Amino acid sequence: MLSDVRSYYGFTKDFGQAGYFETSQSQQIVKELSHEIRAGKLVTLSGIVGCGKTTMLRRIQDTLAQDDG
């Protein structure tokens, strides 16, 4: 089914390889949440289905890993 959707809309990449477009607002959120996590604070992230919560968490995880390395 996904291949049919990709074909219909002319997508050339699999959805998992499509990349991530980061806005200035999302960059600021990543920066602020990363800072709070480093400070040992508990943070929550909520939103409607499909709004990008998992993508945001992965971005924060990548940022924390880069800073540690």
Image (cartoon, rainbow, N blue to C red):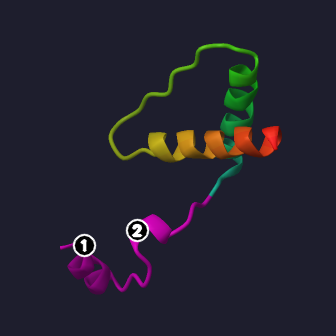
Image location (x, y in percent) of residue 15: 40, 68
Alpha carbon separation for disc pair 1 and 2: 9 Å
Which quarter of the figure has residue 61? top right
20 falls in the magenta region: yes
Which quarter of the figure has residue 14? bottom left
Q: Which residue is outermost to the left?
A: 1
Relative to the observer, which residue lies in front, 65 or 13? 65
Image quadrant containing the N terminus:
bottom left
Of callouts 1 and 2, the N-terminal one = 1
Task: State left or right for residue 9 relative to residue 28.
Answer: left
> In the structure shown, which secondary structural element does the residue marked by tag 2 occupy?
helix
Q: Which residue is outermost to the front?
A: 69
Image location (x, y in percent) of residue 34: 71, 31
Q: Which residue is outermost to the top?
A: 41
Residue holding disc 1: 2
Instruction: Write down the region rendered in magenta.
Output: 1-21
> In the structure shown, which secondary structural element does the residue marked by tag 1 occupy?
helix
Task: State left or right for residue 26 relative to residue 6.
Answer: right
The dot on residue 31 is none
Relative to the observer, which residue lies in front, 62 or 27? 62
Residue holding disc 2: 15
Crowding near pointer 2: few (<14 within 10 Å), some, many (20+)?
few
Q: Is residue 52 above or below residue 48?
A: below
The answer to whether the residues at label 1 and label 2 have Cβ atoms under 8 Å apart is yes
Q: Residue at x 35, y 36 (%)?
A: 48
Q: Amino acid at mark 1?
A: Leu
Relative to the observer, which residue lies in front, 34 or 51? 34
Task: State left or right for residue 12 relative to residue 27.
Answer: left
Image location (x, y in percent) of residue 16: 44, 65
Q: Residue at x 56, y 45 (%)?
A: 58
